[in-house]
Amino acid sequence: MIETDICIIGAGPVGLFTIFEAGLLKMRCHLIDYLPQVGGQLSEIYPKKPIYDIPGFPSILAQELVDNLMEQAAPFHPTFTLGERVETVERQEDGSFIVSGHEGTKIATKIVCIAGGLGVFEPRKPNISNLGDFESCGVDYIVKDPEKYRNKRIVISGGGDSALDWAIYLAEICEEISLVHRGEIFRGAPDSADKVKALHDEGRLNLHLNSNVTALEGNSELNKVTISHKDNGDTLVEVDYFLPLFGLSPKLGPIENWGLEIEKNAIKVNTFDYATNIPGIYAIGDINTYPGKLKLILCGFHEAAMMCQSAYKTIYPDKKFTLKYTTVNGIQSF
């Protein structure tokens, strides 16, 4: 049995920052995550994608942010269970909890903090009959390492931010790149859409609007795709990789069975301390919902700080706490 003050379910950026905030209050954390490494979506989906809205960093790569958060948390000696999904959270008579993983790990904790992002993700896949034949040999649903596509021929499908961002980025390193979108107007940021159109005008990107990728060809590896325009028929394009970037579909998984109040695939919390309807269980980051919710990493950091203040009062109801700035107290490790 692992014993801790706070069990954090989810080792993404918000969960990692919670270690630091809890550590300032002398509370120990154990993190459990279904992914085999820390970092959540940042490490699993886009480790080399730049992030622009972290205070103090005009631009920082996703994995670099994760590494910095781990360095920041290190003085407080967090412990981890990785590659294991939480199945049950059972409240004990004294108000504490037993958190159980699907491989048998059990964690005794005073506080449960759910920082599971959007839950378990599955890619949204286009309706192409033989799509599965080329998964891992020409079809990728996420971009983990853009260097994989250097000097290659790429076709991207999608009209959202991910498709636009990667089309712009990969246009700088690919031999040839095409962006296929089923409509005429992109769903992503207007500035990104303008950049894509500029790349097309410069001859650096092939843009196929009102079109879909409808067929894939190849033997052991993908080598051709068919792009079908709704009015102008089919075009056969030679490729090395096809990237259908239609986003990821989140699922809450076992969380749905824990007695928490759920609204539209998210956990309802109050905005005083991000507590759920079950005393002692909090939800922070993209997994929660409340009026005015913004799904931004920096908002999750704020929620982590407020949650830890409340958790401290729950764990130490008789202690008087006085907030002191780190510029005064410094960082005192365990």
Image (cartoon, rainbow, N blue to C red):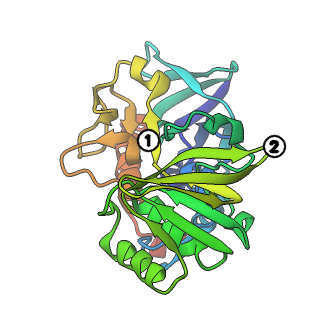
Query: Mark 1 falls on what kind of element?
Result: loop
- Label 2 or label 1, whichever comes before in sequence order: 1
What type is the residue that disc 2 sits on? Answer: Ser
Q: Quadrant of residue 54?
A: bottom left
> Splitting the image into 4 quarters, where does residue 55 fall?
bottom left
Contact (CB < 8 A) between labels 2 and 1?
A: no
In the foreground, 269 or 51: 51
Residue 283 appears at what percent x and percent y? 38, 39
- Give the numbered dot on residue 333: none
Q: According to the image, label 1 marks what residue?
A: 118
Res 220 label: 2
Q: Position of residue 49 (x, y in %)?
A: 57, 67
Count residues near mark 2 (Cα–Cα under 10 Å), then give few for <14, some for 14-19, many for 20+.
few
Q: What residue sits 27% from the left and 37% below the top?
A: 269
Of the residues shown, which amino acid type is indicated by label 1? Answer: Leu
Residue 324 or residue 117, whichever sits in front: 117
Looking at the image, residue 76 sits to the left or right of residue 199; the answer is: right
User: Residue at image x 51%, y 78%?
Assistant: 59
User: Dividing the image into 4 quarters, which one contains the N terminus?
Assistant: top right
Of 141 and 286, nearer the camera is 141
x and y, in percent, of residue 104 in the image? 69, 18
Residue 150 appears anywhere in the view: yes
